[in-house]
Amino acid sequence: MSQPTLLKIYQSLLSAFGPQHWWPANTAEEVIFGAILAQNTTWENAKRAIAALKNTENLSFKKIPTINLEELADLIKSARFLNQKAKALKAVADYLGNTYNFDIEKMKKKPLGKLREELLNLYRIGPETADSILLYALEKPIFVIDAYTKRMFSQHGFMKSDDSYEAYQKFFMDNLPHNVQVYNEFHALIVHTGYLYCKPKPLCEECPLSHF
DNA sequence: GGCCAGGACACCA
DNA sequence: TGGTGTCATGGC
């Protein structure tokens, strides 16, 4: 794999599908809510949970500590794994409050590596969620690997299906310019393409990646 | 009724 | 370290 090839895949998906305008949220804070609520569920179900928080004026990490756990879990139940995700939102709220006084702009001033370490120490923030927050909420140059990325790029022979998250991430970051906008758009395009051609039965031969 | 969705984690050997 | 089970909604 050469850098021009991966860049060509990106350009090809971009011209085929256009800009995806990710992350679908109004504020950085909403991106963080969404990154947790969308874990291993459909975006539609995550959106319902976000709407429920918004309708009750609880879509703010300042408000999360004031809601009891059961009530919070009930509000976000459409996003699946309600109890775990409710605890995760509580943990992030504590972290944001204690470390940054809920000021995302203050958070952005910290270096990428330090922020990633802090996020990974939080309950139910794994590599994909941490990187989604870093890229889409904090505008840090790190590539997000998700289930679609693994499926598509292993099915088309660029990687192995059992390669680690880190291996996939290195593959993308070694072969693309370190650019927030490119990482943002490429990951969004991969999810879009994966949704069209990779689930549940793969339509690999029709997938744009089959041309590379 | 069964399977799957934009993961993470506990537990066990 | 890796393999497997758990979490516990909603749509198709």
Image (cartoon, coloured by chain):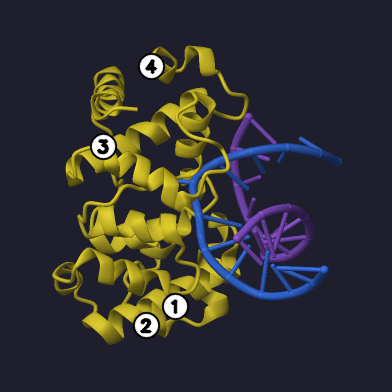
Chain colours: A yellow, B blue, C purple
Give amino acid for label 3: Glu
Q: Which mark is residue A212?
A: 4
Label 3 sits on a secondary structure element that is helix
Badge 3 sits on which subunit? A
Q: Give the image location of residue A130, x and y in percent.
A: 37, 61
Q: Residue at x 46, y 17 (%)?
A: A207
- Out of A27 and A75, give the one closest to the viewer: A27
Mark sitting earlier along the chain (3/2):
2
- Residues flagged by tags 3 and 4 on a common chain: yes
Is the Cβ of the residue at disc 1 closer than 8 Å to that at disc 2? yes
Tag 3 residue? A185
Q: Give the image location of residue A172, x and y in percent.
A: 33, 40
Q: Residues within 10 Å of mark 4 (few under 14, many from 20)?
A: few
Mark sitting earlier along the chain (4/2):
2
Please indicate whether residue A65 sits to the left or right of residue A177 in the image.
right
- Closer to the observer: label 4 or label 2? 4
Tag 1 residue? A90
Location of the C terminus of chain A by quadrant is top left
- Closer to the observer: label 3 or label 2? 3
Tag 2 residue? A94
With respect to residue A105, does A90 lie above or below?
A: below
With respect to residue A114, does A45 lie above or below?
A: above
